[in-house]
Image (spheres, helix red, strand yellow):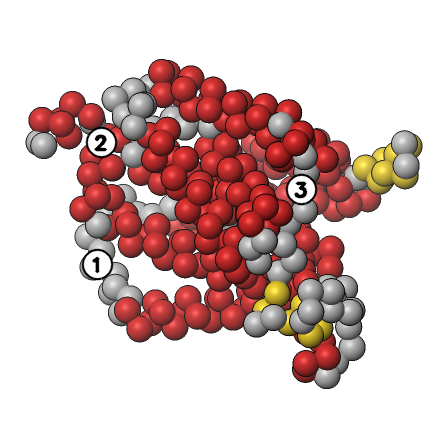
């Protein structure tokens, strides 16, 4: 297959630039000012110009640079990473991400915390939907059970941060087991309807049980501590402020940095566990169930 002629390459480049301009204008060209906004096209035009140049350069490159030859040789199998190499790379990435707790602003730490929470939810949902192929539309209900279990354990049982955290995970898993037994033989649309109903039941109960959950007003959660050191300007739980222990000035971003590091650690261990789970017999059984349930059942 030969390269497109120059006029057609220019046309394709212009089309790509127009598409880039249309997509980038609402994202980078709209400046909000209260209830009003202004539209500036300087940044979208730069993006469109860059897309135009890149598409034009790619279209003018020789075919041998962008397309492999017709005769394909069997490439040797790339060498596999050794376990220590993979572990070293994972540690480098982990500490690089952990360094953001020191250099990132409070705003970006809040964004990263939300991102890690949704990454954790995505990893859990991937086990159900990705590995087993079960359409679970009420997965967020378990998220709500864990969150409320964390807060209510502090309010009614007096649990601290490190005591309520594993309890919330166990409570969410317990609700998953309770829901799993009745719907064990369901699949497809029926499973989706049942799980969707579970998610709605959890939402309605949590929002309307004012005496227990506080309803839309929510409930107080335990403040995170580290070996009894509190991330506040002054200790309120009989502990010692974190910044006084290490002798530096108090910053309101200390709490966000600590939560970010805790979440990063939890996400790292979860990612490792999910990766290992995929190679285990139960993980392979889930994947076989996803690909062909009848064949999987026939093989036991």
Residue at 40%, 54% in the rendered image: 271
Label for residue 219? 3
Does residue 104 appear in this view?
no
Give the quarter of the image for residue 86. bottom left
Asked if disc 2 and disc 3 are in contact, CB closer than 8 Å, the reply is: no
Image position of 153 with respect to 144: above or below: below
What kind of element bears circle 3? loop
Say whether marks 1 and 3 touch (CB < 8 Å): no
Can you tell which mark lies on residue 289? 2
Query: Residue at image x 59%, y 50%?
Result: 154
Q: Give the numbered dot on residue 77.
A: 1
User: Is 75 drawn above or below residue 200 in the view shown?
Assistant: below
Q: Earlier in the sequence, mark 1 or mark 3?
A: 1
Question: Nearer the viewer's eye, disc 1 or disc 2?
Answer: 2
- Which quadrant is the N terminus positioned in? top left
User: Label 3 crowding class (10 Å Cα cut-off): few <14, some 14-19, many 20+?
Assistant: some
Mark closer to the observer (2, 3) = 3
| Distance (Cα) linking label 1 and label 3 | 56 Å
Q: Categorize mark 1 by other alpha carbons within 10 Å: few (<14), some (14-19), many (20+).
A: few
Mark positioned earlier in the residue sequence (1 or 2): 1
**Disc 1 and disc 2 in contact, CB within 8 angstroms:** no
Q: Secondary structure at mark 2?
A: helix
Q: Residues within 10 Å of mark 2 (few under 14, many from 20)?
A: some
């Amino acid at each position: 297959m030969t390269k497109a002629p120059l006029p057609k390459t220019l046309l394709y480049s212009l089309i790509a630039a127009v598409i880039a301009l249309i997509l980038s204008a609402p994202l980078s060209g709209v400046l909000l000012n209260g209830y009003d906004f202004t539209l500036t096209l300087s940044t979208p035009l730069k993006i469109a110009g860059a897309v135009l140049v890149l598409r034009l350069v790619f279209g003018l490159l020789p075919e041998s640079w962008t397309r492999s030859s017709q005769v394909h040789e069997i490439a040797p199998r790339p060498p596999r990473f050794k376990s220590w190499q993979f572990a070293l790379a994972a540690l480098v990435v982990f500490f690089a991400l952990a360094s953001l707790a020191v250099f990132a602003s409070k705003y970006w730490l809040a964004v990263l915390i939300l991102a890690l929470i949704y990454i954790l939810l995505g990893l859990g949902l991937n086990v159900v939907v990705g590995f087993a192929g079960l359409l679970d539309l009420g997965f967020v209900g378990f998220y709500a059970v864990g969150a409320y279990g964390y807060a209510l354990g502090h309010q009614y049982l007096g649990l601290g941060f490190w005591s309520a955290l594993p309890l919330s995970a166990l409570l969410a898993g317990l609700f998953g087991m309770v829901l799993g037994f009745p719907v064990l033989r369901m699949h497809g649309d029926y499973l989706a309807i049942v799980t969707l109903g579970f998610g709605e039941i959890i939402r309605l109960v949590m929002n309307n049980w004012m005496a227990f959950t506080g309803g839309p007003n929510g409930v107080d959660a335990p403040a995170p501590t580290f070996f009894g050191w509190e991330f506040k300007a002054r200790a309120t739980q009989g502990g010692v402020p974190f910044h006084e222990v290490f002798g530096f000035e108090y910053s309101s971003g200390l709490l966000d940095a600590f939560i970010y590091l805790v979440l990063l650690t939890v996400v790292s261990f979860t990612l490792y566990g999910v990766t290992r789970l995929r190679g285990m017999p139960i993980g392979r059984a889930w994947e076989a169930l996803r690909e062909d349930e009848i064949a999987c059942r026939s093989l036991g």
